[in-house]
Each structure stands twice: as C-alpha cells, then as structure tokens.
Image: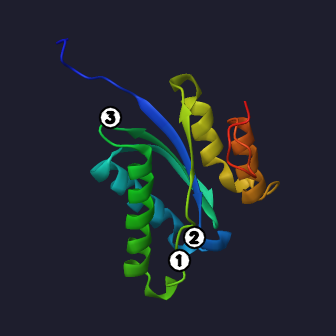
Amino acid sequence: MGAGHTFSRLLVHAVFGTKDRRARIKAAFRERLYRYMVGIAKNEFGRVIEIGGTGDHVHVLVSLRTDVSVATAVRKLKSLSSGWVHATFPDEGAFGWQPGYGAFTVSESNAESVGRYIRNQEKHHERQTFSEEYAALLRKHGIDPETGKKTD
C-alpha cells in the first residue's frame, strides 16, 4: 500500500419522510423508486447497502465516498428521486419529500443489524408510526426530538 492512498468505510443511516408525512410512496412504484435511488447513490456519491420504508418515509444505509458530505448525498437522493417520480408517474404530482432528514453514523459492527431494521420496516410499522419511530431514533442518538439539540 502506498502512503498516499485514502481508505474509508463511511456508513450513514439516513431517514426522511414524504411531504406532510402522507403515504405518497405507493406500493405500485415503491420498488422501482428504491432501485432508482440505488442508482442515484452509485452515480453520485457511493453505494446503497440497504433501503426500505413504508408509504410515508424511507430509510437508507449508504456507504459514502470521502469527497461527498451527508448533506449532499441526501439532497441528491431526495431531489433526483422526486424528479424521477414526477417524470415517470405524472399522476403523482403531489409526491415530494419533507424538508430535513435524520442521519446517523453506523459502525461496521452494527451495519447488519441496521440493515435488518431497514428491511423490516413494514413489519415494524404495524406497531409504531413513523413519527414515533423518528422521535425514538433521535433520542437513541442523543437528540431531543422537540428542539433538535444534543441531550448529552
């Protein structure tokens, strides 16, 4: 290995909801949307390890290149996928993503459990709403859901 090489494995679990948290990710196009988002990641900033969600939100576990920020990656995922939905499904004019997102670093040792969590979103949300889940994720990562401030 040469001294000038850069090596990294930057894993991020990002989660974001649809506009007004309404169930706008319809089952009829959900898998196609996810595949398109996988392509966005590959072309723009890294690689999707896992993607999943329900009608009102998406979770994505990504491995980021070192030259791309989390904000840039999420912005590209949201803007390019929203544009694709509008172009591909003209009847889905109300589709859009809410402003903001949650993003959390993931260690390699936790990547499989986070991936499993993302794969099981449908089952998980039989018991908990997205709002409840999102607040719990924020608390788990030391963020007050009401203020957005660090709690520890």
Circle 1: residue type: Phe
Q: Nearer the viewer, mark 2 or mark 3?
A: 3
Residue 103 in sight? yes
Earlier in the chain: of badge 2 and badge 3, it is 2
Pointer 2 with pointer 1, Cβ within 8 A: yes
Mark 2 residue element:
loop
Residue matched to label 2: 25
Image location (x, y in percent) of residue 59:
57, 51
Earlier in the chain: of badge 2 and badge 1, it is 2
Q: Nearer the viewer, mark 2 or mark 1?
A: 1
Mark 1 residue element:
loop
Where residue 66 is drawn, which disc sits there?
Answer: 3
Q: Residue furthest right?
A: 127
Residue 129 relative to residue 81: left or right: right
Mark 3 residue element:
loop
Per the model, the C-alpha gap separating discs 3 and 1 is: 31 Å
Image location (x, y in percent) of residue 90:
43, 86
- At horizontal 72% and vertical 58% (from top left) the residue drawn is 130
Q: Which corner quadrant of the image does residue 116 belong to?
A: top right
Mark 2 Cα-neighbour bin, 10 Å: few <14, some 14–19, many ≥20? many
- At horizontal 17% and vertical 12% (from top left) the residue drawn is 2
Q: Quadrant of the N terminus?
A: top left
Residue matched to label 1: 95
